[in-house]
Amino acid sequence: MKYISTRGDRTERGFSDILLEGLAPDGGLYLPVQYPKVDAATLAKWRGLSYHELAFEILSLYIDDIPAADLKTIVAKTYTPEVFGTREITPLKSLEAGMQLEALSNGPTLAFKDMAMQLLGNLFEYELGRRGESLNILGATSGDTGSAAEYAMRGKKGVKVFMLSPHGRMSAFQQAQMFSLQDANIHNIAIEGVFDDCQDIVKAVSNDLEFKRRHKIGTVNSINWARLLAQVVYYFAGYFQATKAPVDTSSELPVVSFAVPSGNFGNICAGHVARSMGLPIKRLVLATNENDVLDEFFRTGTYRVRGSTETHETSSPSMDISKASNFERFVFDLLGRDGARTKQLFKTDVEDHGSFTVSADEFRRIANYGFASGRSTHADRLATIRDTWQRFSVMIDTHTADGLKVAREHLESGVPMIVLETALPAKFAETIVEALGREPDRPEAMRGIEQLPKRFKVMRVDAQAVKGFIAENA
Ligand SMILES: *Cc1c(COP(=O)(O)O)cnc(C)c1O
């Protein structure tokens, strides 16, 4: 399988060429030249597979420059019950009739980002080892991504992580999760500023191309294709758990819908890829919180990015985004893979005017892709968490609550709805207490982590000083 850019550069690159990269050189995102199709016979064959076997089958359709035996080993050591807590890896939990949760957050950092990041850690170690190279990952985090990256890269050969976070602004739990790591290849830098200051420093360092090359600086952000690909697997795994095998090959395939708490459009974009491969998904229901950039697009056809003053701090913080970094991938497909037009919309129109509107004809075509959308507020989250706890004794986190609230608005009879559970309530204790008047349960391994010794470096908002620290420790 070869990969091209969404902005018109049709140079074909292999999987391992794009694995360690972020954006394509023309500023676009990488996508496969086409989506491999799976038919009913393939689905029947895959139905009985374990999670890691299924992951191998799907990944090998997209990766032909890693020997099959090696890929099999990498996937098998990634998706284990020891790391993800259950044999199914992403088990379903039933709520009201037709409604199920798919657990994606039983990995080491209790959020769905582990599903992809754990694989990325193993792929990076393999690829760097094969090339005899090393990589220094630089990132900024306000919580979930940074910890998922650190737990995926800890102890990996050839990889070091430099993660900036706003000093004293993460929850005690999030700080403990990250700062308690004692691995020599993990460097936590607490910046005396806000999250935007951290991001600005990352940008400043990355824009110094000479420094970037000399110190082999890389990233693991959500636009990485391998992360998206890893996420495709659990759409298939959820489908197989929610449906029964058709009685014979001539009977119609059962369909399901998915509801996805969304921010950067990475998670639901994997659903779009799964559906494009032929997985019988009826609806992809996109849920936002008060930061409803994407809901607005699917309702109106206008994509309008927001400034930081228009970006609300909510109780589902991992969805507090002002522009959705993976959205360009879907729009490229919607526009019939017209790279020039995609570039016009995302480079010229968004950069110059902060928005674009698709044509009436393009807007109508969105229906062919199965998307529906809705939004949820803090009051909705509290009500949904309370209601789900009272009726089913199931405790959900604030992001999953956004997904479930919107899922209920789109439930159709005869079509199972699978809500992706993107984090565990233990990560967002404050809102759980507000909703339920009690603390959320914590997985055994996370009890008392606030008391563990912490290892981190405090630094001023000073890109030069951060560069110095990297140069010293890389
Ligand atoms: C990252 C994240 C999301 C949003 O996922 P996207 O891929 O950015 O759409 C939702 N919920 C949680 C808990 C997350 O960490």
Image (spheres, rainbow, N blue to C red):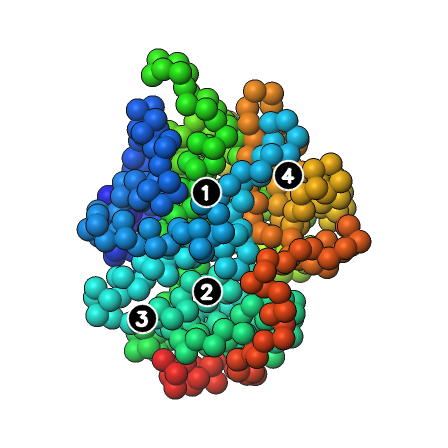
> Percent x, y for residue 29?
37, 51
Apparent side of residue 162 relative to residue 55 in the rendered image (left or right): right
Asked if the residue under mark 2 is in contact with the one under mark 4, i.e. CB atoms within 8 Å, the reply is: no
Q: Hey, what amino acid is under mark 1? A: Glu
Q: Which residue is mark 2?
A: 151
Element under disc 2: helix
Q: Nearer the viewer, mark 4 or mark 3?
A: 3
Alpha-carbon distance for marks 3 and 2? 14 Å
> Percent x, y for residue 10?
26, 46
What residue is drawn where x is 62% and y is 49%? 399
What residue is drawn where x is 27% and y is 49%? 72
Asked if the residue under mark 3 is in contact with the one under mark 1, i.e. CB atoms within 8 Å, the reply is: no
Q: Which residue is mark 3?
A: 157
Asked if the residue under mark 1 is in contact with the one under mark 4, i.e. CB atoms within 8 Å, the reply is: no
Element under disc 4: helix
State whether residue 254 is above or below residue 434: above
Element under disc 1: loop
What residue is drawn where x is 33% and y is 42%? 53
Q: Hey, what amino acid is under mark 4? A: Leu
Element under disc 3: loop
In primary-sequence order, the first of circles 4 and 3 is 3
Q: Nearer the viewer, mark 1 or mark 3?
A: 1
| Mark drawn on residue 404 | 4
State whether residue 168 is above or below residue 122: below
In primary-sequence order, the first of circles 4 and 1 is 1
Alpha-carbon distance for marks 4 and 3? 40 Å
Q: Which residue is mark 1?
A: 88
Alpha-carbon distance for marks 2 and 1? 21 Å
Apparent side of residue 464 relative to residue 445 in the rendered image (left or right): left
